Amino acid sequence: IPTHNWSSQIVMSHVVGDIMKSMGYTVEYTETDSNAVYDMLKTGEVSVELEVWEGVFGKLFSAALESGDVVDAGSHQATTREEWWYPAYVEDMCPGLPDWEALNSCAAKFATSETGGKGMFLAGPEDWPQHHVERIKALDLNFEMVHAASAEALWSAIDEAKAEGRALVLQNWTPNFVEAVHPGKFVEFPPYQAGCNDDPSVGINPDMAYDCGAPVDGYLKKAAWSGMAGKWPKAYQTLEQISFTNAQIAEMAKLVDVDGMTAEDAAAAWLEANRSVWTPWTQ
Ligand code: TMO
């Protein structure tokens, strides 16, 4: 079971691993890049991926399915959104938000020493391929992308900006613990439509792709190595039944990012508190 660099995915991986262990399976965790994992699934080097977020990984996942070596093990109940986001007080500093067109008129307020006169967009780590640079170009935004080194660096940037009353727009997503802790909103870009990230003619810029926002009710899927169902049929059956809600996933993130638990302890606590949710999946 591969783990990545955001808390809900790590906790969920341990939750599912512990469920598989309760069924008698042997489980090993391996920390991997969240892009590379789609190739690792093709060879069975990893068996599952528990959080395939449409906005960031949809393209990689579709390509992996086409290879025939990766299968779609179904969707979680949760729907997802991964998008530029700002803490609520920023709206007073940049009237017109959450509409994206407001960003350029206040770009200077988002500027840092790193970005000169341009606004800074603080993106997540490099292995979350969301094509922000392409979008900045396609929508002619006076912004420059800077990568945060980790998810934790995104959260401390919110705390620092808040303490200093500075404008900040950064990568965020839902479900996440952030919504319970920091009031704020996603930027409303031109709505996502099929093809806008591939076909220049689709979307408001006739010459460029990526001229749209991320899906607002994206899927969250489970993926598996195509050999899993044959090798461990019962485990695969359980994987197909596993389905977490937005609230459950936000809670998994909170146990680590707010309560400071380790992923292992968070998974154990979650399983203990939610026995009636997961035991039917093992039957
Ligand atoms: C994949 N992520 C939830 C970090 O956008």
Image: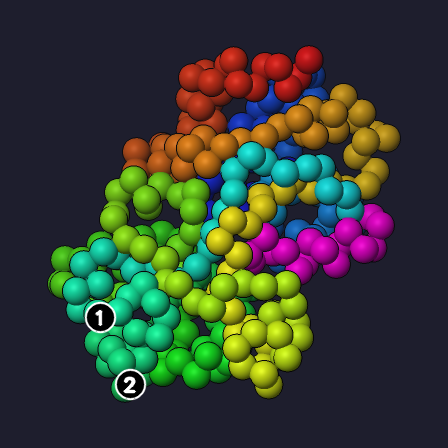
Alpha carbon distance from label 1 to label 2: 19 Å
From the viewer's side, name the closer residue of 204 and 122: 204
Residues in magenta, as a range: 54-69
Main SS class of the magenta portion in the image: helix
Q: Earlier in the sequence, mark 1 or mark 2?
A: 1
From the viewer's side, name the closer residue of 258 and 149: 258
Q: Is mark 2 within 8 Å of ligand 1?
A: no
Residue 175 can be seen in this image: yes
Q: Which residue is mark 1?
A: 94
Q: What residue is rendered at 47% in x and 40% in y?
A: 8
Disc 1 element: loop
Query: At which x and y percent is residue 80?
Result: 50, 47
The amino acid on which the numbered mark 1 sits, given as a three-letter code, is Cys
Q: Quadrant of the C terminus?
A: top right
Q: Is residue 111 magenta?
A: no
Query: At which x and y percent is residue 134?
Result: 53, 77
Q: Is 240 drawn above or below residue 148 in the view shown?
A: above
Label 1–label 2 contact, CB within 8 A: no
Q: What residue is rendered at 68% in x and 37% in y?
A: 74
The amino acid on which the numbered mark 2 sits, given as a three-letter code, is Gly
Q: Which residue is mark 2?
A: 116
Q: What residue is rendered at 47% in x and 61% in y?
A: 125
